[in-house]
Each structure stands twice: as C-alpha cells, then as structure tokens.
Amino acid sequence: MGSWNWFSKSGFNSSSTAEQVTEGIDATRLTAIVTGATSGIGKETARMLALRGANVIMLSRDLKNGLKTKELILQENPEAKLEVMEMDLASIKSITSFAQSFNASQQPLNILINNAGILACPFQLSKDGIELQFATNHLGHFLLTKLLMDKLTTTARKTGIEGRIINVSSIAHRKYSKEDSLLDLEIINNPTKYWHFLLCNYFYNLISMHFMNTHVAGLISSSLN
C-alpha cells in the first residue's frame, strides 16, 4: 500500500471515487456553483452534485465548452439540473457581471466551489493589468466569493441549511520557498509559481474561516486538498 493510500476516519482514501463518497446523500434541496466545471475535478464535482440531485451552476469562460460538458453529463443523467453560465475569472468585469446577474435572480446559493485554475502559462497580463495566473487562481475567486457572500448568508438564514465555501487546493503550497518572489518575472511561468498562488489561497482560507466564525453565522469555509 502506497503512502498516499491511507484511510481517513471516514473510511475513505485516495482511491475512493466521488460516487462512493457521496453515496446515500440527498442534495435535492441544494444549489451549487462550480468554477472550472468543464474538465477534471470541476467536471466530476458538477456531475456528482447533479447525480445527487443538486441544482448546479457550471461556470466556464468558454460558453461552448460549458454547454458541451453539460450535454455529456445529461447523456448519463437526463434528470440532471444543470445551468451553464459564462464567467472569466481573469476579468473583474466578467466576475462582477455574473455576480450581479446571479444575485438579482431568485435562485438560492448553498455551496460555492472555487475550483478553476491555470498553471505554468507564459507571462501575460489580464485585461485588468494583473499577472494572469495571480488574477485567475487567487484574485478572481476572492472577488467572486466576496460578491456572493450576501447570497450565501441569506440562503443559509432562510433555509436553515449551513452553507459551504470550498476552495479546491493542493498540498503543493508546502513547496513554497522563501527564496522565491511572487513578482519575479524571470520564472513567472515556472510551475513553482503555482505553489505561491496555492499558498495565497491557503492563507486566504484561514483568514476567511476566522472571519466567518466570528462574524458570519451559517457558513463554513474550507480548503480541499
């Protein structure tokens, strides 16, 4: 048995599937937003939430790609409640536009899953003049969470169901070196820079947990490694 194959107190390990972990869960009363829902962890998260009955808002910067992913999930689960909405995490305007539209809707929000991210791309600036990885992997999710906070807390208060903010992370943040600078453009597209953003998200989550435990009732924020 490998070092990564240990069993947690829940009885699951790194080989456990999403279907095994969520077996028996009824999510029909829940509405969830998933960023980066067109591939990888985000796609599987959206698929599994829908399989358990949740209403899932799939966010994608490419609407066509999002709709294609939705159709694939519907082929497997025709009863899935899925909605694809366009949003670019590297754009303040796009995030703000989505949040305003969603907040103005009658839809509740029980779960926000901050999953999307990019890795080791060549140096480039976002439309707002921010380094693209930092804008997408950290600042974008920070702004999205801030703009949806009222909707999350209102839903928790009205329904009595504790809300969740989940930041998909990685133990790779431990690889951060004090020798490196987040602003060093010489290695900005090096995979090590990704570790910096993970560390930023880790600290952000620690701060948000402290804030919500002190000031916000009915919400839990956590990092999922």
Image (cartoon, grey):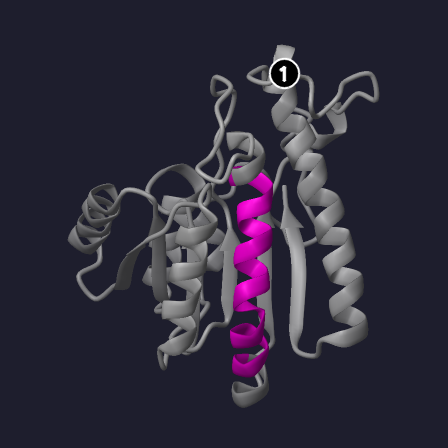
Residue at 69 percent across and 26 percent down: it is: 3
Out of 41 and 23, give the one closest to the viewer.
41
Looking at the image, can residue 64 be seen?
yes
Q: Is residue 86 left or right of residue 147?
A: left
Out of 70 and 84, give the one closest to the viewer.
84
Vertical order, 9 against 182 (above or below): below
Crowd band around label 1 with a 10 angstrom C-alpha radius: few (<14), some (14–19), many (20+): few
Measured from the top left, where is residue 35 in percent x and y? 43, 50
Measured from the top left, where is residue 2 in percent x and y? 64, 24
Q: How many marks?
A: 1
At mark 1, the secondary structure is helix
Residue at 46 percent across and 68 percent down: it is: 25
Residue beneath label 1, please? 185
Q: Quadrant of the N terminus?
A: top right
Measured from the top left, where is residue 210 in percent x and y? 80, 62
> Predominant secondary structure in magenta?
helix
Residue at 44 percent across and 54 percent down: it is: 95
Measured from the top left, where is residue 62 in percent x and y? 28, 42
Looking at the image, can residue 1 be seen?
no
Q: Point out the stretch of residues depicted in magenta.
A: 136-155
Residue at 63 percent across and 10 percent down: it is: 186
Vertical order, 37 against 177 (above or below): below
Vertical order, 56 against 8 (above or below): below
Q: Is residue 56 left or right of residue 65?
A: right
